[in-house]
Amino acid sequence: MTLPAEETFSFQAEAAQILDLMANSLYSDKEISLRELISNASDAIDRFRIERFSAPEAAGAEADDEPRIRVGFDKDARTITIADNGIGMSRDEVIGNIGTIARSGTAEFLRAMSGDKRGDTALIGQFGVGFYSAFIVADRVTLTTRRAGLPPDEGVRWTSEGRGEYTVESAERAERGTTIVLHLRDGEDDLLNEHRLRTIIKRYSDHIGRPILLGDDDTPVNRATALWARPKSELKQQDYNDFYRQLTNDFAEPLAHVHAKVEGRYEYTLLLFVPSQAPYDLWLPQSLQGVRLHVQRVFIVEDTDRLMPRYLRFVRGVIDSADLPLNVSREILQGGQAIDHIRSSAVKRVLKLLKDMADGEPEKYATFWKEFGATLKEGVPDDPAHRDDIARLLRFTSTERAGISLADYVSRMKDGQDKIYYLLAPGLSDAASSPHLEAFREKGIEVLLLDDPVDTFVVTALPRFEDRPLQSVAQGSPDFGGMADAADEEAAEQAGADYAALVGRLKEHLDGRAFDVRVSSRLTTSPACIVADGAETEFALAQRLRGSGLPGRPVLEINPRHPLVERLNGGQDDPRLADWAHVLFDQAVLTSGARIEEPGAFVARLNDLLVALTSGEAPGR
């Protein structure tokens, strides 16, 4: 058969726009080009194996030799070569397949890729679309190929600089398959390095099912097997641990893992790990997430919050699917039912894994909570769909013990108690010594001590648990529900009447500082405390949002049983009553964990009062 020696084809007018889009817009990582070409080579090998058994007449007498992909580089020529012994292409297939993008035009191509049919999204992996990513790093590409079943003199060479035209000519090729030579652009010489190429191959193509050889070395760079694709019955815990270390570079063993193959409308496999220690960047705003997306075992992208929500950013692992909707870059996940389904399933499986750990291995779960508890708490406000499941995984320190769950708290509630009480504070020591706890301790009521910044948002987003409302002990009037008795109520009413005049005087002196002053029923030993007015937002949330350390409408509560307050009540004409009012207020501010506005004025007043006391002047005289 006589073939033309060489033919030149002109791209359509839109072709330059397409190539510019591929090289400059769709692919943010230049290493993607090597990944795409290796992926195409693997596809070509798979197609040859299929054709050899399904249509042996088309494959001819080609030997079923060991499949392989070889990557090489030449520093002097500034080239990178990717060769395979796959099915190869005929002249018509080269023009048809490689020319697909050239013939389709930008609008038509992008419209085809926006469809929701599997055939549309499969265009990403076809020889043609991914192939053109070669022009990210190369200013000239040469492809030499021969289709299985054709004689050696019917090989084809395709050459283009990715601009106005490309040439196709006959070439002698003894072996079937395809060889691609990338003539690198200026500034891309860092790719001409064995270590760099080896790193790229292991990063993006480690689990390609065909051996990838580098240079003249016949030892594969890649493992050529996807551990997650193997049956769980074949794997031991050590296999999972080894894979985890290879995936994460973490020397410690993971706490737990979940490995599942999901079949149905969407088919995918997931292998997810919970580390045993937090990575250094867990709390950095731009920290990477650790779930890698593979499509048919080819690495596509990692660290996307489309696969795993932010509050599960500590999870590491792989999700592998053959039918995820992708856009033309193969990097950016589109929204759609498939990805939403996979994300939802992955979240449910991780939360179940944590639940099983909490129920069956509490010591191991305590380790998890120490490392990632604060991160998991973010899911309460951020993920309403799974809020109840996350709430059951939360652990807190209470006035009685550490590591308590909300379910534990509810199971130990006192008779008549209908609320879950908590106290927000800057630290556990501040919370444990808070005057807000005094009456609750006296009644033997357990209170959760919340010192994590995210706790404010947790209690705001979780108003109830098992039909019990969550109630702050530092907000509004104390409410003991069914635990209050008639004697307490009578004593509170009497104290309110006995101290009404003092309360009025204190309000006058604290005008502009305290929103209100009232007699307290929550104090037993402290003279006063600051609480948030019941009508306003949670105390600590207001603190952090306003940055002042105080709620927007602070209320001073005084203890009628404290000796100092009793003496002030007996001497309301004391000329130093204003100083005592401000000192009481500032002391209450300090014990709440907030800061006082004028420390100098507080110290001056306190010193004056101490001098008066040492000279024999008692409060109220």
Image: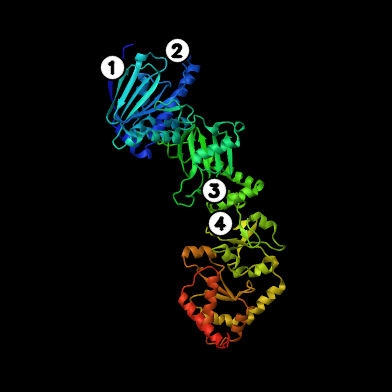
Q: Are marks 3 and 2 in contact (CB under 8 Å)?
A: no
Q: Are marks 2 and 1 in contact (CB under 8 Å)?
A: no
Residue 558, percent across and down? 59, 76
Residue under label 2, please give it: 61
Query: Residue at the spot x=56%, y=48% of the render?
Result: 385
Quadrant for the N terminus, please. top left
Pick whichever of labels 2 and 1 is earlier in the sequence: 1
Helix, strand or loop at disc 3?
Answer: loop
Residue 5, numbered label: 1
User: What amino acid type should be assigned to the residue bearing mark 4?
Assistant: Val
Query: Residue at the spot x=56%, y=39% of the render?
Result: 241
In this rendering, is residue 235 above or below 499? above
Mark pair 2, 1: CA separation: 26 Å
Mark pair 3, 2: CA separation: 56 Å
Helix, strand or loop at disc 2?
Answer: loop
Pick whichever of labels 4 and 3 is earlier in the sequence: 3
